[in-house]
Structure formats: C-alpha cells, structure tokens
Image: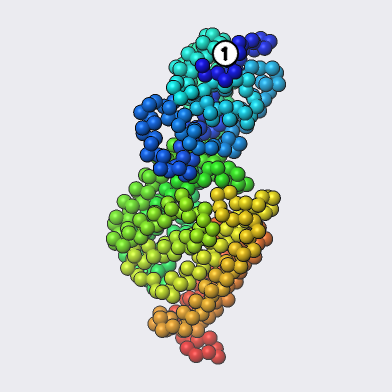
Amino acid sequence: MHATNPTPFEPVAADLPLCVDLDGTLIRSDLLHEALVLLAKERPWLLLAVPFWMLRGKAHLKQRVAAAVTLDVDALPYDQRVLDWLATEQRGGRHIVLATAADSRLARRVADRLQLFNEVMASDGHVNLGSHAKRDALIERFGERGFDYAGDSRADLPVWQAAARAIVINAPRGLAARVRTTTPVDQEFVAPARSWRTVVKAIRVRQWLKNLLVFVPLIAGHEMTNRLLLGQAALAFVALSLTASGIYLVNDLLDLRADRRHATKKKRPFASGALPIRFGVLLAPLLVGAGFAVASTLPRMAVVLLFVYLVMTTLYSFWLKRKMLVDVFSLSFLYTLRVLIGAAATGVLASPWLLAFAIFVFLSLAFAKRAAELTALDRAGREEAGGRAYFVWDAHAVGMFGVGAAFSAAIVMALYLQSDDVRTLYRQPTWLWLMVPLVLYWLTRVWLLTRRGALDEDPIVFATTDRLTYIVAGMAVVILAIATLAPFPIPGTRG
C-alpha cells in the first residue's frame, strides 16, 4: 500500500479529502530531476547505473536515486501561494494527502518538513504512482469522486476525471479549460509568466562581456583597424560566449543547493524554479555544440584552446571550485585563456608581458570575487561558504593575496614600459607611464569596494555598470592615443 498512514478515512465536516501533487504543484521543480542533478555532482560514476535502473521501471529508478543522495528539502523552490492555501485548509480541519509520483523516501521528507499533510501516498520502488496508477490508488482509498485533487500537468488528467473537484496549479495554458470538461475547477493558481528574459538570465548574457578579452591581442598589437582580424576575433567571441553559456547552465544546475542558500543567487532561474531543470539539461549541450560549430571556422589552435576552456570550466564546476585557492587560480587561468583564444583566432600573438600582466590582474579580480562572497557571508552571520573551502575569517588573507596581485600587475606594467616592444609600438611611450597609477587606482578601488561589501558580483561584470570604470577606461584610451600620435614626450623626460 502507498499510504504511510493507512487509517480509515473519516471526512471532517462536509469537506472531502484534499489530495495534492508534489512535482510542479507543491514545488516549482521535479524531485527526480533534482536528485539526478545532485547525483551527477556528488556521485557522478553512478550515472552509468541509471540506464540499468531504468530498465527495471521508473519507480525503481526513483527509489535507487533517492537512496543515493541526500536532497536538501528545506531549500526546495516551494510555491508559497500553495503553501499558504494548504495552511488555511489545514486550519479548517481539512484532511490533506500528499499524492505524488515521487519516491516515498523523498515525499515523506517533504511532508515532515512542511507539517501540512495527514498522510503520504507515493511511489514505492515497484509502482510509479503517477497518472492512471495514482487515480486507481486514490479511488481505492477514497472512492470515485470522493476526493479533491490539486495537480499541474496533463499526466494528472485521469486523476482529475475521478475527483470531485479540481484545483489546477501552474498548469500549461489551456489545461484548466480541458479539466473543466470533466470536473468542476474549484481554484486555479496561474503559473508565473515565463519570458525570454528568464532564458537570457539563465544563460548569463551579461557574463559575455568577459569574452571581450579576445580582442585584447588586437588592441595591444595595434590591429583594431584590420577588418579581417576583427571578424576572426568576433567569431571567437561568439564561439566562446555560446560555450560559456552552456557551462553556466551546467554550473547552475550543479550549484542548486548552494544557490538556494545564498541571499541573491536563490533568485537564479533554476534555483527559484522559474525554469525547469530539464530545460537546462537539454539546452547546455546545444549551446556548447553551437559554440564549437562557430569555432570550426577559426584556426585549429583556437578550437584546441576552446576545448581546453570547456574542460577547465567543467572541472571547475564539478571539483576545482571546492578547493581552497585552486578555485581562484583556476578563475585567473580561465580569464587569461580568453586572451589566448583571441590570439589564436587572429594570429596576433600575445606578448609575455601582456600575459604576465593579465595573469596578475585576473588573479586579483578572482580574489576580489571570493572576498566579496566572504564579506556577504560575514554580514549574514554565517561562518562557512556553502560549497567552498573558505570561512569568513579567511577574508583578510584573501584580501592580502588579491591586493598583492594588483600591485604585481602594476610592477609588470612598469617593467614592460622599459622594454624594446614599447618603443616599437608607440611614438612617445613615456606617456604610457600615466597608465600605471591609473591601473592601480582602479584595482585598489575595486578592493576598497569589496571590503566595504559594495561589490556583490563578478568584478568584471561590476565594471560594466560602474560609472568611474568608464571614466578610467576613457582616460586610458586618451593616454594610448597620445602615446601613439604625440610628437613629443612628457616634458622633462626622454622620448
């Protein structure tokens, strides 16, 4: 029997028992999908067993997956409207049943957490309690038309047909009208509208700004007027952006637990349930495939480096980001790798000076990103970063490392300005010395904002919305133009 409390049902007042679905109804997600994603993160080798579990039926698959993971039911994306409604029904003495195709192990944990249900009916490893099977079990328990049912999908149509009244929650457009042809609809909870903005947010189009780094070799090599090379760099930008978006989807799916515990990340499309997990699972490989399709038009080394980027970001999502300091150095490498992809795509090689400068700048920014997270955790009264190998008291050391990297970048730039390369590329290179304090100003300002808790996202993305960053960038462009075109050096210096 599927009921955890199989006591004879006795109606309270005139109300029939209220049977409520779980996946898509009580939560804006699917417990099987949630558990499979967690399995991929924590015990990925068991994914090889999934097809064999499936051969024994969906109920067996759900049971084995549920036994292999520990799902954080406290942080699931519950539909608060539904919880409030069920609480009202409970206060009125309504007998409420959680009737779900999810595995009983997970369903009971959800019921224990919410304390809203009198009993639980769920899949038991042998019978998948969905659609017709759920209808038959509810008729056996309460009789035909002896219960009200709240569900969300077309799979619930057989159950609604056997129910006295229907409650339609988060259903596809037109489903409620179809339900009304067989069963009175008592209430309807309309699903929040999904728009293209939700998808844009999920694939993190804003993060594509980082990929503008592929143009750095052209800028440093004074090749920005070469249309052919600009086109090659643009293709590299598109290929890298599509690939990165695919990896961002994977990263967000693997980080569901940590994101839901985070003050702002819990609003991300997958963490909040605004987009279904299966959407991300399907879209991620399509984006990566599209990225490599674009990259196939570029030189072979650009494709190789894009593959290195894919491998590194995948390793970062699954493992590296949970390793102390390794995560920060990995981020710095991934930033620098964007520059290398741009160099490979255009054939304009990045000088050792440029790479050294980039490594230290990006290392500083990677430390700033981690320090910002630790500062936010400290203000929230938490000690440990979920999914990270840091504690809030590490913020001071992380800050020292980051500021040290910032000053190292300035030193590399100063040494570069004394090299023969500069005299070849610039007419009056002494003007470039003004870039050193400018770079230091911007980096140290980022760190001051970080320590004040004013930097709550990726520093490079922050830079795109910061007015002073644009002013600094404008001043840098002016300095570069003067160094390239001016007929005289800075007064009192040698040209």
Which percent across, then down, holds residue 102?
50, 27
Q: Name above or below for residue 13 compared with residue 119.
A: above
Q: Residue, x 49% and y 62% (percent of image)?
A: 329
* 459 on left or right of 428: right
Residue 158 can be seen, yes or no: yes
Which percent across, then down, holds residue 442?
58, 69
The residue at the far right in this view is: 91
User: How many discs mark residues in the rendered view?
Assistant: 1
Residue 463 can be seen, yes or no: no
Q: Name above or below for residue 12 compared with residue 303.
A: above
37, 447: nearer the viewer: 37
Q: Name above or below for residue 167 compared with residue 376.
A: above
Scheme of colours in the image = rainbow
156, 68: nearer the viewer: 68
Crowding near the residue tagged with mark 1, few <14, some 14–19, many ≥20 C-alpha atoms within 10 Å: many
110, 268: nearer the viewer: 110
Q: Residue, x 54% and y 33% (percent of image)?
A: 28
176, 158: nearer the viewer: 158
**Residue position marked by numbered label 1 in the rendering:** 147
- At label 1, which amino acid type do we have? Phe
Give the secondary structure at mark 1: loop
Q: Name above or below for residue 342 compared with residue 67.
A: below
Q: Residue, x 67% and y 54% (percent of image)?
A: 378
* 315 on left or right of 303: right
Quadrant location of residue 338?
bottom left
* 87 on left or right of 41: right
Which percent across, then down, holds residue 215?
41, 65
Which percent across, then down, holds residue 438?
57, 73
Q: Residue, x 32% and y 55% (percent of image)?
A: 295
